[in-house]
Image (cartoon, helix red, strand yellow):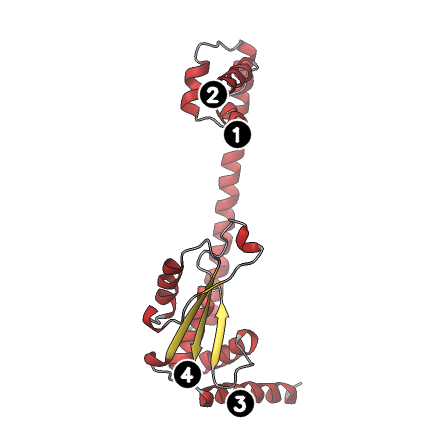
């Protein structure tokens, strides 16, 4: 196998390809390819082509970096304006945000508990702030649970979500290992799985439901 790779690398070098291009095609480290082809002299025309290609790549890279910088600068302006418009978050703001978030993402089926599951740590932090600051839930009443694919680490996921939510792992329910078609694809776009933040309290659940209904009625009145 190595003999074939070496032969292919030498043939490509004789054709005028760069070491980097040969590395990409053959799949062998650049250091090995350099040794294999070091005795092959390129023609002046081949050297000119490589030099032109190198210059072209440098120009393209500089343009890419310029575009990225312009995009980053534009985002910084947008983010600054957004921060100025939003300003601080009042208790009422947090109440409305929390109710709207639970309305859209929280569980409506279980009457005796508040449960919200998400993969986005920002969502979990927001609902936890709502639970703590608006509903006044004491730390010992929180429960957490991780839903994760079998090829991922439960321990790492639980440690991650404990840090995000502020709920200690000792108050987590047993992690649920979920097998699905997507779990067989090793892209790991969600390496920490899905986290559910729960509070088992019928009165608090009824309170949130009442807030949702009040908002719905007020919205209908203002149409």
Identify the residue under disc 3: 210
Give the Cα distance between marks 3 and 2: 71 Å
Q: Quadrant of residue 135?
A: bottom left
Q: Pointers 2 and 4 in contact (CB under 8 A)?
A: no
Local crowd at mark 4 within 10 Å, few (<14), some, or many (≥20)? some
Local crowd at mark 1 within 10 Å, few (<14), some, or many (≥20)? few
Please determine whether, in this image, residue 222 is positioned above or below residue 85: below
Give the Cα distance between marks 1 and 2: 30 Å
Q: Which mark is residue 2?
A: 2
Which mark is nearer the camera, 3 or 2? 2
Identify the residue under disc 4: 134
Which mark is nearer the camera, 1 or 2? 2
Which mark is nearer the camera, 2 or 4? 2
Q: Pointers 3 and 4 in contact (CB under 8 A)?
A: no
At a point 46% along the width and 88% down the height, the residue shown is 202
Q: Secondary structure at mark 1?
A: helix
In this view, the residue in front, 211 or 71, is 211
């Amino acid at each position: 196998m190595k003999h074939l790779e070496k032969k292919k690398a030498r043939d490509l070098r004789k054709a005028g390809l760069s070491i980097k291009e040969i590395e990409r095609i053959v799949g062998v480290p650049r250091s090995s390819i350099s040794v294999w082809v070091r005795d092959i002299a390129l023609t002046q025309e081949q050297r000119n082509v490589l030099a032109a290609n190198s210059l072209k790549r440098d120009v393209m890279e500089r343009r890419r970096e310029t575009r990225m910088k312009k995009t980053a600068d534009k985002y910084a302006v947008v983010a600054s304006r957004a921060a100025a418009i939003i300003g601080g978050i009042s208790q009422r703001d947090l109440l409305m945000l929390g109710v709207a978030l639970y309305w859209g993402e929280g569980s409506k089926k279980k009457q005796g508990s508040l449960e919200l599951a998400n993969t986005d740590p920002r969502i979990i932090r927001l609902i936890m702030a709502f639970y703590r600051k608006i509903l006044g839930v004491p730390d010992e009443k929180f429960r957490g649970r991780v839903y994760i694919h079998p090829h991922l680490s439960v321990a790492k996921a639980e440690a991650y979500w404990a840090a995000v939510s502020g709920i200690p792992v000792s108050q987590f329910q047993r992690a649920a290992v979920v097998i699905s078609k997507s779990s067989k694809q090793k892209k790991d776009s969600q390496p920490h799985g899905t986290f559910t933040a729960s509070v088992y309290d019928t009165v608090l659940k009824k309170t949130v439901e009442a807030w949702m209904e009040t908002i719905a009625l007020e919205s209908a009145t203002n149409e």
